[in-house]
């Protein structure tokens, strides 16, 4: 019911600047490939700064953060499984999955659509 209220409050056509910031919420996760925990820090900074201004950015920021936290947990588990060799293909699969999902979410945000990542634990509601 709470999600229905949020969906009613989000304008059907977000402004171009809202779509751009929502895209940056997703794209900033690529910082994790260069900076440790950058995949969480990047979306967190954008979300904290822009969420009071836009419900659309708030939605995408929370989605990006939840997905990146989930992927980090999955990666830690897969890294531990690398000692049993099974973790190596899982880790590579997670990296490919993350990149593809970030690109899809970025494109959806650019179109002004809401997007929910699959296999995401909802830490931030």
Image (tube, grey):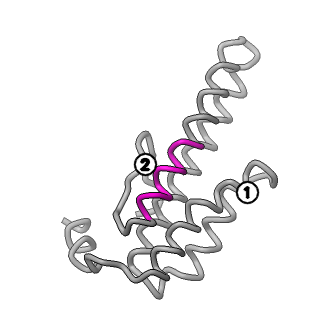
Q: Residue at x 38, y 79 (%)?
A: 55
Residue 16 within the magenta-colored segment of the rendering: no
- Residue 28 as seen in the image, left or right of residue 97: right
Q: Is residue 6 above or below residue 99?
A: below
Can you give x and y, in whole percent of width and height, for residue 113 in the image? 34, 64
Distance in Å between CA atoms under marks 2 and 1: 18 Å
Which residue appears at 25% of the width and 71% of the height?
7
109 or 29: nearer the viewer? 109
Instruction: Give the vertical position of 9 relative to 83 (above or below).
Output: below
Q: Is residue 108 magenta?
A: yes
* Mark number, residue 6: none
Mark 1, secondary structure of its residue: helix
Which residue is located at x 20 percent, y 67 percent? 4
Pick the residue in front: 106 or 10: 106
Quarter occupied by the C terminus: bottom left
The tag on residue 117 is 2
Name the quadrant of the N terminus: bottom left
Residue under label 1: 31
Q: Label 1: few (<14), some or many (≥20) within 10 Å?
A: some
Q: Badge 2 local density, few (<14 within 10 Å), some, or many (20+)?
A: some
Q: Main secondary structure of the magenta part?
A: helix
Q: On the rendered structure, is 33 left or right of 103?
A: right
Q: Position of residue 52 (x, y in %)?
A: 47, 86
* Magenta stretch in the rendered image: 99-109
- Secondary element at tag 2: loop
Q: Is residue 46 above or below residue 97?
A: below
| Position of residue 120 measured from the top left corner of the image (x, y, whole percent) | 45, 45
């Amino acid at each position: 019911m709470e999600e229905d209220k949020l969906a009613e409050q989000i304008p059907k056509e977000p402004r171009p600047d809202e779509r751009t910031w929502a895209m940056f919420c997703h794209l900033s996760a690529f910082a994790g490939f260069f900076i440790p925990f950058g995949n969480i820090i990047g979306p967190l900074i954008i979300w904290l700064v822009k969420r009071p201004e836009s419900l659309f950015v708030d939605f995408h920021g929370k989605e990006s953060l939840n997905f990146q936290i989930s992927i980090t947990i999955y990666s830690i588990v897969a890294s531990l499984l690398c000692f049993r060799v099974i973790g190596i293909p899982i880790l590579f699969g997670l990296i490919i999955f993350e990149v593809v999902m970030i690109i899809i979410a970025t494109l959806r945000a650019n179109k002004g659509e809401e997007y929910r990542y699959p296999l995401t634990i909802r830490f931030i509601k």
